[in-house]
Image (spheres, rainbow, N blue to C red):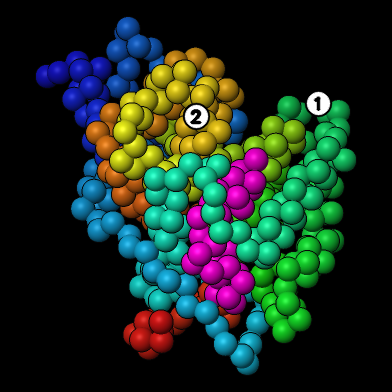
Amino acid sequence: MEPPHQEAEAHRGSFPPPNATGPGYSCGDAPTMAPPSTWSEISPPPTYRPIRAPAINLPHSNTQQAIILAPVPQSQKAPTVSPPYHFQTPVKKIHTPDDIRHFHDSGSGKNFLGFVVALSESIRGHKISDPCHQSQTLNSIVSILETILRWVDEIPPVDQSSRYGNLSFRIWQSRLADNADSLMLQFLPEDLRSATIEIVPYFTDSFGNSSRIDYGTGHETNFAAWLYCLARIGLLKEEDYPAIVSRIFVKYLELMRKLQNVYCLEPAGSHGVWGLDDYHFLPFIFGSSQLIDHKYMKPKSIHNQDILDNFSNEYLYLSCIAFVKEVKKGPFSEHSPLLDDISGVPTWNKVNSGLLKMYKAEVLEKVPIMQHFLFGWLIKWVEPMHIMLDLQEL
């Protein structure tokens, strides 16, 4: 039998990597098992520990195999709605695994994931600084993100005994809630002003939870859902997609990193060392798409510090790696073994397709995350008996 470290090396370069998937746990649950003991005497267990008891993604061969065999999600156009509009307050609908399956079988589920894929494809081969079409609506959204970014400087963290979860975040969140409608009205035309009732909840849920003072991939998914809603009402068009990633999402990521650092947000249901990082997923998808067919940079290039220093401002994936290395100490292979394993995948195209499949399985198909997802008129909850009719409409 191979020693543990040799066995791990034998799996290097597979995607999804071993130990990457498994049963999900709700935020704060303690794992019922320890992570697999694959550390040799030469490479001891990692010293990094997540802030809370992690919702560790324990190995589950059936789940891993299912992701590997799953088809790569395909891009779809976001169909625009026409008057008369029926905007409504979005509500939670997902409570069980059956609800998850109903969502993914519906036109809404397929189209939302297709929108994420379309954003990923739009930035393929492009640097962040590359010129791109920027509509007035898009520029207004960037300006709004810059505004709420400045609020962080205006609301400094309070002195408190607890290291994590600074209470000033609740003040920032309260200001966001109080001003959300007026922020939306900065870009909504007169005939769409009534859309605030539906789009504001997605927006305010995009930046973390004020009660728990945490942030995770569910909040990030809400931000993608907010952008999807704006595409559905025709304010963001396909020609805007490259700028949605390189202008809006880059600014959103800047804001979230500042919120995480200043207010010490806890990871919402952190996967600890077995996740991509403690907070995000989408920038890894968009960033791997940027690097597809790059002449010089390969997945293994993340281990070259000169490349990170010189190109992390142009490529989201490298930016994420640089940020992880900045906030976590110790050997990269120990505090981020999943990212380390992905660096052994031969091409960025395989990294991108694997991450898209993993996003569907590990975020959009997890009840603890998706139980907070909202459904209204723009992202419809379709009862099982009406799914075929819903698909025909799209």
- Which residue is at the front of the view, 28 or 344? 344
Look at label 2 and name its amino acid: Phe
Q: Residue furthest left?
A: 1
Is residue 234 shown above or below 64? below
In percent of the image, x 33 and y 63: which residue is there? 74
> In the image, is 270 to the left or to the right of 210?
left
Q: Main secondary structure of the magenta part?
A: helix
- Residue at position x 65%, y 37% in the image: 257
Question: Would you place residue 193 above or below residue 16 in this image?
Answer: below
Q: Amino acid at mark 1?
A: Ser
* Mark 2 element type: helix
Q: Position of residue 270 (x, y in %)?
A: 53, 39
The residue labelled by disc 1 is: 161
Disc 1 to disc 2, C-alpha distance: 38 Å
- The answer to whether residue 366 is seen in the rendering is no
Total labels drawn: 2
Any magenta on residue 89?
Answer: no
Q: Say whether residue 248 is magenta.
A: yes
Residue under label 2: 311
Which quadrant would the C terminus be assigned to in this image? bottom left
Name the residue located 72 percent from the left edge and 73 percent from the top edge: 188
Label 1: element kind: loop
Who's the residue at 81% across and 26% down the image?
Answer: 161
Residue 63 in percent (x, y) is at 28, 49
Q: Which mark is residue 169?
A: none
Which region of the structure is painted magenta? 227-254
Q: Nearer the viewer, mark 1 or mark 2?
A: 2
Dot 1 crowding, Cα within 10 Å, few <14, some 14–19, many 20+: few
For the N terminus, which image quadrant? top left
Mark 1 vs 2, N-terminal side: 1
